[in-house]
Image (spheres, grey):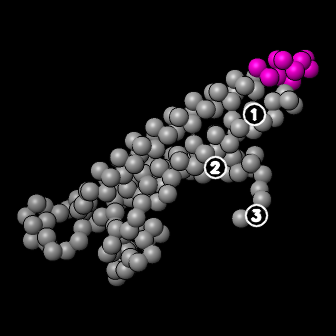
């Protein structure tokens, strides 16, 4: 993986999350919610790692920290306080990951039928697979595709 700038990567991440916030205002297919939850869980897990690494950078570079007046003591206090606040944020990301993982399990148990399907029609088509989360080929390389290009078959594993 090529070396990149943390500042630019953070900017790209913020922009991607802005687009995601916009695109999730309405879901055309509720089965897509499973994959959004899955990718959010992976994102939160990575954010937990990032804040831990940024906190470590504050601690490891403490000797370089100074306040705006040039005082090392003031800079040390600010760096250590930032590191502690980042540690707390990391704990919150860890808890958020657990909640997203639980939500993903529940969402993955839902078989989404088209709105036009009546309970009687659903019973008649019990042998056919409804629109469900299992069609997400990006996370399941063994998935087969149907005539409309959607993946069918195994559900595969969760994204990390």
Nearest-to-viewer mark from 2 and 3: 3
Disc with the residue nearer the chain's start (3 vs 1) = 3
Q: Are marks 2 and 3 in contact (CB under 8 Å)?
A: no
Horizontal side of residue 83 vs 64, given as left or right:
left
Q: Where does residue 11 sit, x and y in percent of width and height?
A: 70, 47
Q: Nearer the viewer, mark 2 or mark 1?
A: 1
For label 1, the SS is helix
Q: Residue at the spot x=50%, y=40% of the render?
A: 94
Q: Residues within 10 Å of mark 2 (few under 14, many from 20)?
A: few
Q: In the rendered structure, which disc, 2 or 1, sits on the residue that comes first in sequence?
A: 2
Place of residue 18 in the rendered image (x, y in percent of width and height, measured from the top left): 58, 46
Quarter-of-image position of residue 112: bottom left
Residue visible at 39% across and 41% down in the picture: 99
Q: Are marks 2 and 1 in contact (CB under 8 Å)?
A: no
Q: Which residue is mark 3?
A: 2
Whether residue 28 can be seen here? no
Distance in Å between CA atoms under marks 3 and 1:
24 Å
Label count reads 3
Q: Secondary structure at mark 3?
A: loop
Dot 2 corresponds to which residue?
13
Where is residue 71? Give x, y as percent: 89, 18
Binning the other alpha carbons within 10 Å of mark 3 as few (below 14), some (14 to 19) or many (20 upward) gives few
Using the numbered discs, state the Cα–Cα distance from disc 2 to disc 3 in whole angstroms: 17 Å
Question: Is 45 included in the stretch rendered in magenta?
Answer: no
Q: Nearer the viewer, residue 109 or 121?
A: 109
> Magenta segment range?
66-77
Measuring 71% from the left and 65% from the top, which residue is drawn there? 1
Q: Is residue 74 magenta?
A: yes
Q: Residue 58's mark?
A: 1
Identify the residue at image location x=35%, y=47%.
103
């Amino acid at each position: 993986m090529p070396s990149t700038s943390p500042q630019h990567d953070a900017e790209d991440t913020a922009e991607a999350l802005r687009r995601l916030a916009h695109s999730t205002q309405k879901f055309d297919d509720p089965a897509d919610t499973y994959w959004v939850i899955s990718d959010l869980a992976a994102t939160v897990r990575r954010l937990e790692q990032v804040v831990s690494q940024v906190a470590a950078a504050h601690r490891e570079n403490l000797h370089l920290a100074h306040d705006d007046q040039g005082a090392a003591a003031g800079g040390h206090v600010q760096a250590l306080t930032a590191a502690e606040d980042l540690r707390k944020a990391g704990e919150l990301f860890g808890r958020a990951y657990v909640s997203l993982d639980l939500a993903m399990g529940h969402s993955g148990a839902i078989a989404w039928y088209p709105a036009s399907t009546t309970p009687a029609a659903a019973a008649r088509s019990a042998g056919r697979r409804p629109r469900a989360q299992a069609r997400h080929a990006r996370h399941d390389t063994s998935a087969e595709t149907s005539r409309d290009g959607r993946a069918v078959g195994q559900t595969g594993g969760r994204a990390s």
